[in-house]
Image (spheres, rainbow, N blue to C red):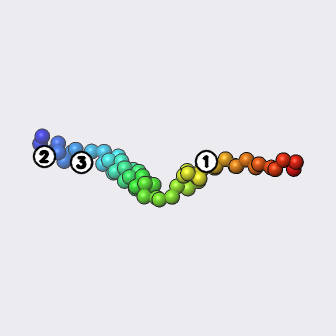
């Protein structure tokens, strides 16, 4: 591989390469931020499914 081919590898389509790097960084940052959160919003934890209500037992004759 000559020097011109090596240089051309980085300079050809440089806008697309820069855009792909920016998008990769943004996706990485988004996933990293999502994984770092301790509490899940919108009820995605154990409180999402409520416990069934206990049946009320009435005394006889009520």
Say which residue appears at 51% left-offset and 58% top-offset: 39
Which residue lies under the disc numbered 3? 10
Q: Is residue 10 left or right of residue 40?
A: left
- Tell me the CA gap for discs 1 and 3: 53 Å
- Indicate which label's residue lies in the foreground, 2 or 1: 1
- Indicate which label's residue lies in the foreground, 1 or 3: 1
Q: Position of residue 58 (x, y in %)?
A: 80, 49
Q: Which mark is on residue 24?
A: none
Task: First in sequence, mark 1 or 3: give its number.
Answer: 3
- Tell me the CA gap for discs 2 and 1: 63 Å
From the viewer's side, name the closer residue of 23 and 33.
33
- Tell me the CA gap for discs 3 and 2: 11 Å
Whether residue 57 is situated above or below residue 38 in the rendered picture: above
Q: Specify whether residue 34 is in view.
A: yes
From the viewer's side, name the closer residue of 33 and 27.
33
Q: Position of residue 29 (x, y in %)?
A: 40, 56
């Amino acid at each position: 591989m000559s020097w011109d081919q090596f240089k051309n590898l980085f300079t050809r389509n440089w806008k697309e390469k820069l855009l792909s790097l920016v998008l990769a960084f943004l996706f990485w940052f988004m996933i990293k931020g999502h994984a770092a959160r301790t509490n899940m919003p919108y009820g995605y934890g154990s409180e999402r499914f409520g416990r069934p209500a206990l049946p009320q037992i009435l005394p006889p004759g009520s």
